[in-house]
Amino acid sequence: MSVSRFSVSLENELLVALDDYARANHFPNRSRALRQLIERDIVERKWQCGNVVAGAIILVYDQVKRDLMNRVAALQQEYHEEILSVQHFYFTRTIAFNILAVKGPAYRLTELADKLIALKGVHHGKLVMTRADERHVKR
C-alpha cells in the first residue's frame, strides 16, 4: 500500500488531545493515531444503512454566530420526521448545548448529524445510535 503525505492544521488543544490519544493508545506517532481514528470512523459508518435506529445528536455551538440558528432550524424542519425532541442548554451567554433525540433509518440520522456538525459555528458534534427495530428491543 502506498502512503501519501499531507499537512494538517489543528488548534493547539486538538494537537495536545491527539498527542494524548497517541500516547494513551501506544501509537508510535501521530500518523498512526490519525489512521486509527479514520479507520474507526469508516467501520462505524459501514453498518449505517437503512436499519431503524434511535439515538442522540449532541451539538456544542456558538449561538450568536451569524445565521447559525436559522440554519439549524431549517435542518430540523427538513428532518422533522426523524427528530423526536430537542433539549437546549446554555453553557455561557453565547455557547449553547443541544441534544436532539432522533429515530429513523440510520442513513437519514447520519445525514442530519453530518449536516449539523458541518455548520460554521458548531464547535463539536457527535451522533450516537443504537438499533431500535422491534426485533432487537428486549421485552
Image (tube, grey):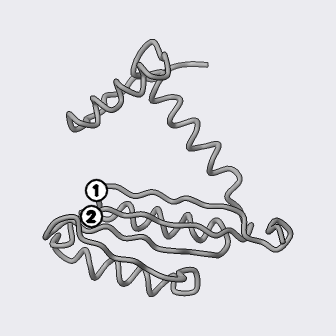
What number is the disc on residue 61? 2
Q: Residue at x 82, y 65 (%)?
A: 136
Q: Where is residue 113 drawn, in percent x and y? A: 48, 65
Determine whether 87 is above or below 3 in the image.
Answer: below
Task: Determine crowd level at label 1: few under 14, some 14-19, many 20+ residues with C-alpha closer than 10 A.
Answer: some
**Kind of residue at badge 1:** His
Q: Quadrant of residue 8?
A: top left
**Kind of residue at badge 2:** Tyr
Along the line of sight, the residue nearer the viewer: 56 or 64: 56
Task: Determine crowd level at label 2: few under 14, some 14-19, many 20+ residues with C-alpha closer than 10 A.
Answer: many
C-alpha separation, residue under disc 1 versus residue under disc 2:
5 Å
Along the line of sight, the residue nearer the viewer: 35 or 55: 55
Q: Is residue 131 left or right of residue 78?
A: right
Callout 1 touching callout 2 (CB < 8 Å): yes
What number is the disc on residue 123? 1
Q: Residue at x 58, y 35 (%)?
A: 39
Q: Quadrant of residue 15?
A: top left
Q: Residue at x 61, y 61 (%)?
A: 129
Determine whether 76 is above or below 127 in the image.
Answer: below
Q: Quadrant of residue 92?
A: bottom left
Looking at the rendering, in which quadrant would you find the C terminus? bottom right
